[in-house]
Image (cartoon, rainbow, N blue to C red):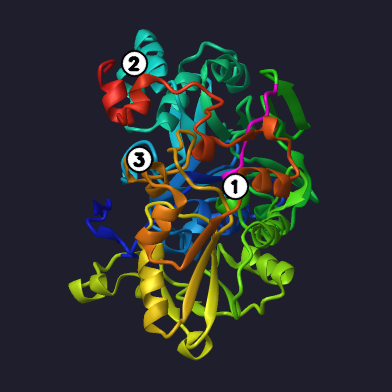
């Protein structure tokens, strides 16, 4: 529960288990002839799945930057009247789910800093791993009081560091700071005249460039380009910095690329209509389902997905196995953030708030249930119980990713290792724990093959425990950012 600036309390709608959450979605646009705030609004709307706690937009008319942000979904934060006040020729936007820093208005993005050579607004997707070192570097710069940190996020630290540089402009300042950053970051930021974007040397989180008739767009996913009518140009490359203004787009390589794209983007995080590294996500997920059917066949009457994330893999499983596909679960599309606390009765209903079985479809059937992942196991346990109550004869669970055994330090809010059910149990023990008749995960080899990306260019840490970017003791010990930076304040 958190308090908004207007005094209202916000609550997370209850569900049996919160699934893996990406930290953020980012969007930027430079288009003098367009309503940039509205383009950004719809871009964020397309990226809403990447963050549902807060949303914000910054715009510039060439003279000043205005930021509007608040807690809640994009559609809850902005009204038509709000967007009309956000005028200008360039904008950046952000939708947030917190992995570092609490879910409060102060930590909503974009962040804002005033300097001698202009104003800086910045939005970030990812998670830095060297926040302690950066906080120490920031303290040594002896910033003036008006530039003290006033939030608890790695984004605020980045913004303050760029603003504190003695470069002749933000471009040179950013290029001085980027090599200092370790971890995962896809950034969009701006001053009064220029849109900037940057991606870490490993390219852990996605970031793409699109072209409008008379402008440019940068976004976390290609689906956001489609929504605003921009044509896909290319991905922002690993270790690349770009600047966009009236002179067009210019690019600088600030680091040698060492690609380690997040494999979980293919499994769950990205929208199915997004493409990553030239591969459509929906196509990848269908291929994962087909691989699951080959690796874990079963005699059954019906294949059903856990909507929406399990749907493409369920289609692939049904096609490969020859078992009919059906919609056995109905999802409430409006489950998300709410300002109304659920009653105890609703809490006890648990997963039914989000999913409800179609008894006529399920009753008397041997069912294959396809989902993208198992984290703690609470959702699957409640779901299987619900399906048995609806009359399912057998329930065979198939998961389109390997067992999740390790936490993510690069921008996904997984549970701690102690809470991950597969970290302490073998597959057969997980099966018994959730109550399924059989349980099968796709193999690591099968997952990698479906992405069509070389294993050496992927981050698979949540499945393998092999972290491509060093994790400092502070983070691996579970300390939050506020604890890490407090000793430098």
- Screen quadrant of the C terminus: top left
At 59% from the left and 76% from the top, the residue drawn is 300
- Circle 2 packing at 10 Å, graded few (<14), some (14-19), many (20+), is few
Residue 425: % across, % down: 39, 47
Left or right: where does residue 101 sit relative to residue 276?
left
Residue 384: quarter of image: bottom left
Asked if residue 210 is positioned above or below residue 333 in the image, the reply reads above
Where disc 3 sits, the SS reads: loop
Where disc 1 sits, the SS reads: helix
- Circle 3 packing at 10 Å, graded few (<14), some (14-19), many (20+), is some
Identify the mark at residue 251; answer none if there is no mark: none
- As drawn, the residue found furthest toward the bottom would be 360
- Screen quadrant of the N terminus: bottom left
Asked if residue 340 is positioned above or below residue 137 in the image, the reply reads below
Name the residue carrying label 1.
265
Tags 1 and 3 touching, CB below 8 Å: no
Span colored in magenta = 257-264
Which label's residue is closer to the chain start, 1 or 3? 1
Asked if residue 322 is positioned above or below residue 29 in the image, the reply reads below
At 36% from the left and 22% from the top, the residue drawn is 147
Left or right: where does residue 136 sit relative to residue 128?
left
Residue 196: % across, % down: 63, 32
Name the residue carrying label 2.
144
Q: How many numbered marks have been drawn onto this rendered protein structure? A: 3
Residue 385: % across, % down: 36, 73
Name the residue carrying label 3.
416
Where disc 2 sits, the SS reads: loop
In the image, residue 262 lies in the stretch drawn in magenta: yes
Left or right: where does residue 388 sit relative to residue 186?
left
Judge depth for marks 1 and 3 and give the one in front.
3
The answer to whether one can see residue 40 in this image is: no
């Amino acid at each position: 529960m958190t308090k908004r600036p207007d005094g209202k309390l916000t609550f997370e709608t209850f569900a049996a288990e919160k699934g893996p959450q990406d930290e953020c979605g980012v969007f930027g646009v430079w288009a003098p002839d367009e309503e940039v705030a509205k383009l950004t609004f719809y871009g964020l709307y397309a990226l809403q799945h990447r963050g549902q706690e807060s949303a914000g937009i910054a715009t510039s008319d060439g003279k000043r930057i205005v930021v509007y942000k608040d807690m809640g979904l994009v559609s809850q934060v902005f009204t038509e009247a709000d967007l009309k006040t956000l005028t200008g020729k360039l904008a950046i936007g952000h939708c947030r789910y917190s992995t570092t820093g609490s879910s409060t208005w102060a930590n909503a993005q974009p962040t804002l800093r005033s300097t001698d050579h202009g104003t800086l607004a910045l939005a970030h997707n990812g998670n830095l791993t060297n926040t302690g070192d950066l906080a120490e570097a920031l303290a040594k710069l002896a910033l003036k009081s008006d530039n003290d940190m006033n939030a608890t996020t790695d984004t605020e630290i980045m913004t303050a560091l760029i603003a504190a540089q003695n470069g002749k402009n933000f471009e040179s300042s950013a290029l001085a700071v980027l090599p200092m950053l370790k971890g995962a970051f896809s950034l969009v930021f701006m001053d009064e005249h220029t849109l900037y974007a940057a991606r870490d040397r490993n390219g852990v989180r996605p970031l793409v460039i699109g072209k409008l008739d008379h402008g440019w767009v940068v976004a976390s996913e290609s689906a956001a380009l489609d929504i605003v009518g921009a044509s896909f140009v290319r991905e922002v490359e690993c270790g690349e910095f770009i600047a966009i203004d009236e002179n067009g787009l210019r690019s600088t390589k600030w680091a040698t690329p060492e690609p380690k794209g997040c494999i979980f983007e293919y499994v769950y995080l990205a929208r199915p209509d997004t493409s990553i590294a030239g591969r459509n996500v929906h196509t990848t997920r269908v291929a994962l389902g087909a691989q699951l059917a080959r690796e874990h066949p079963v005699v059954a009457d019906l294949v059903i997905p856990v909507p929406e994330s399990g749907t493409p893999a369920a289609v692939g499983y049904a096609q490969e196995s020859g078992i009919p596909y059906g919609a056995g679960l109905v999802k409430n599309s409006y489950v998300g953030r709410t300002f109304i606390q659920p009653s105890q009765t609703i809490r006890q209903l648990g997963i039914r708030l989000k999913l409800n079985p179609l008894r006529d479809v399920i009753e008397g059937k041997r069912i294959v249930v396809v989902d993208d992942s198992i984290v703690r196991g609470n959702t699957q346990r409640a779901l299987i119980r619900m399906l048995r109550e609806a009359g399912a004869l057998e329930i065979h669970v198939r998961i389109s990713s390997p067992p999740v055994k390790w936490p993510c330090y690069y921008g996904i809010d997984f549970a701690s290792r102690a809470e991950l059910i597969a970290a302490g149990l073998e597959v057969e023990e997980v099966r018994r724990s959730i109550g399924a008749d059989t349980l099968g995960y796709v193999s690591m080899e099968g997952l990698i093959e479906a992405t069509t990306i070389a294993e050496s260019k992927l981050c698979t840490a949540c499945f393998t425990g092999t972290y491509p970017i060093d994790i400092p003791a502070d983070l691996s010990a579970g300390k939050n950012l506020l604890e890490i930076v407090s000793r430098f304040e």
